[in-house]
Image (spheres, helix red, strand yellow):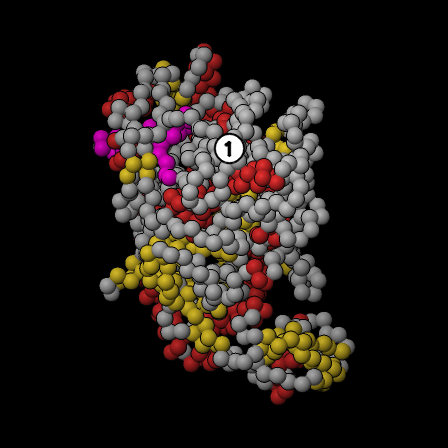
Amino acid sequence: MDPPRPFRPPRPGPGPGPGPGPTAPMARGLRGLAGFPPRLPSPGSGEPRPAPSPFPALFRGLGLGERARERPLGRGGAGDGRALAQPGPVEPQQQQEDKGAALAALPTRGQILWKGRGDALPTQPGRAAATPALCPPSPRPCLSPTPTPETPPAAARPPQGTKPVPKGAAVPVGLNFVKIHCQNEAVYQYHVTFSPEVECRAARIAMLKEQRAVTGDVMAFDGSILFLPVQIPKVSLKAQRKSDGEEISINIQMTKVLEPSSDLCVPFYNVIFRRVMKILNMSLVGRHFFEPAQATTLQKHSLHIWPGYAVSIRRKDGGLFLMVDAIHKIIRSESVLSMMQSIHAQCQRTFQDECTKQLVGSVVMTRYNNRTYRVDDIDWDKTPKDTFTLASGQEITFVEYYSKTHGITIRELDQPLLVHKPKEKQMPEGKRKLEMVLLVPELTFLTGLSDLRNNSRTLKEVMWEMIQSPQQHYQRLTSLLRRIRDTPDASRELGRWGLCLDTDIYRTQGHILPGERINLRHRSFLPAEDLGWHREVTKDVPIAVISINSWLLLYPKRLQHLAKDLLAAVRSSCGSMGMQVGQPTVQELRDDRIETYVRSIQSSLGSQDKVQLLLCIIPNGRDDIYGAIKKLCCVQTPVPSQVINAQSLTGHPGKIRSVVQKVLLQINCKLGGQLWGVDIPLKQLMVVGMDIHHSRSQGMRSVIGFVASMNHILTKWYSKVVFQMPHQEIADSLRLCLSQALKRFYELNHSLPMKIVVYRDGVSDPQLDTVLKYEVPQLQKSFHTFQNYQPSLVVVVVQKQLSTNFYCLTGEELVSPPLGTVIDHSVTSSSWQDFFLLAHHSRQGCSVPTRYICMWNTANLSSEHLQRLTFKLCHLYWNWPGTVRVPAPCKYAHKLAFLVGQVLHHEPSAHLSEQLFFL
């Protein structure tokens, strides 16, 4: 592979873009690094020439035409800023213009401030030593180095429903959204006070309901705020408190007149629709509605599958929409107590530890009230014979409570109790919630597939019952709409507030991004329709291949036959993939105990000078051995390692050959090889992926996975992890991560990236403002590590846990839309610049796109450019020869954080930071 070439300004000539200035002499390299073209100083006096944006020229390879410079995406004030002028001497006007023009083609490079080694390196002649404060470009005065991002003025955001549809192949797309029409002119908000004060919220609601002669039958009241579809004058009413007969004065005063589609109306519209779902005899479990009467029972696996719906009303660019998703709930037929008894029968000595391992972190449901709880602990000292205190202050045992309240008789009196710790929230009256909720295992049932995932056959049978084709999914949605129309009470409930639903799902126009060309060392090709290229990468040579000359193979004696099959398959497969694999040092173990594996690995690594790879075969289902090997090879003695489950090497020769081919590709990545790439026209670019892993175990710290690209074709990666407080979602160590990535980028390329695009995974809508306020300034502060360094920054939040589905009509059947389908209007947010991209191929079920929210953009990347770049990155995940749902750096960051948080629990060795050891 050719080494990266230094960036040079283009030669002057006809065509768009400014001409370069005179060629500057080469500067001496930094700390022994090769020399690089020095930065050209900006004009020191006079009126500077505005530098035309170089981005349209850089994006010509994307197949998009040039577009006028426009206000960038995002909400920050940095949207339309301009680069700060670098300090420099006063020069003649013509020379200033020449150099100012050259800046458009040659972005500024910086110098590293070597902390702890005295002052910064001497500045080049003619350059001021002082470093200006690095503030994001903003039309407002810069008051601090990292100002808090603010919401842009209204003119910076496109009006509702007017986001432009980019050019591209058009495709009609249906979504699981239903348009809501508001027929009332307005919704009126009132403030209600009671004199003397009535503390009980239920009593206040009951008193106001008695005043229907004034308020009317249609109202939404939470105890202090009243919403009505009609306007009434300021009024004072009289009511009588039933508890003591005291007369209460009720004062109602109008405070706001709201548009029917206002954001303030959406919360109580959702309350109204909950009433509609209850009218249809659906059971509320958590936030969603289910139909237990329509449940499917799998007797073989003791499971019930409840069909249901996730419904919510949301305001989008195109107005109000009802989002409907057809979902399922999996509930065990046997109680948690029965499961605990089974565990006791299998392992009596480690009974409590095994119960804690299997139950803590799982979600259970109590059938007497259809409520779900997360199990946070098990209290082995309490039983149903213990007492607790009711709200009235009465002491009562669990046995008596369930008998009197629910008519349930608890049979096992010595069972321990499950502990649920609710999140701290303030109650309306100012009272805190209970510190813990104690549940009786006999009355609780596990939900989900947590302990069934290890049984692939069971998992397939369960998923077969739940997976729905786009046509089946659409039929369930239209069935719900038909039930609402045909049920008079449900239609009346919506009509009272002037809400009217469309009779069909919402249909709009999307566009398809052009296909991407996959580049190997000796050839390039366009993928097939399903966007898979497994055949090509196993028959042709990758971009960069690492020869394996010194490697270890460990396996227990009883798996000797699998080891022989593995070696034979490696020898027959490596040649076509361009890999040279030498004979391994074989270590046959006498048993499969953890201690045997660890001692053998330590002795083998200690006796050999340079070991490139450790390959281990372990028995099926031995996660403990896997964890011990990874801790040893990633933390204590850093060496790339590959662990193969024995079950994956059993079967017909064709299956083994396929497995070995995938293993060889993984090994090449872990050793620093590069499999394939795509065309990346945008130069001087760094792409960053971030994700955070939260452990299910109590008290375990969360892990930030940070991955950054190290070359211009995005095939070299640098990784780092940082630990933070348990369940902390907002990252607080990003300055350290990005600073170290930039230093390493400079060491490898002798220049710094001038465009940094960060894909931040795992952020929900309520956390967007927090990320903008706390994480973006951390990224900006990392630029202070370098003198006069101001790259453009783009921050994109990635949301993949969506309930949005895409449909495409082919003939009379609804199918999944083509890959690369984008929707960036009508159903997007009215507050953020976002788009939906379907980048992966769904073999079963509906196509669920990924949502991308651009919340900071000083690079002036247009929506089309960002969509194309994102789609390209979805092709670069080397663990799968096809496209994935999220950009490759996000996927790598997720894999890294999961391995560290779930297995290692320690920071990996820095020696592995430039290898994809976590695949």
**Is 660 displayed left or right of 22 in the figure?**
left
Residue 51: give x, y in percent of width and height. 55, 45
Is 419 situated above or below 92? Answer: below
**Quarter of image, res 380:** top right
Is the residue marked by circle 1 packed among few (<14), some (14-19), or many (20+) residues within 10 Å? many
Q: Nearer the viewer, residue 8 or 766?
A: 8
Q: Nearer the viewer, residue 700 or 761?
A: 761
Q: Is residue 102 left or right of residue 613?
A: right
Give the magenta range: 653-679
Q: Give the vertical position of 480 relative to 834 (above or below).
A: below
Residue most extreme to the bottom: 213
List the residue tagged with mark 1. Answer: 719
- The front one of 836 and 405 is 836
Residue 805 spot, x, y in % from top left: 39, 58
Q: Considering the numbered disc 1 on the image, is that residue within a helix, a strand or a loop? A: strand
Q: Residue at x 62, y 81 (%)?
A: 209
From the viewer's perspective, is 640 left or right of 406? left
Q: Is residue 714 left or right of residue 843?
A: right
- The residue type indicated by label 1 comes to Ser
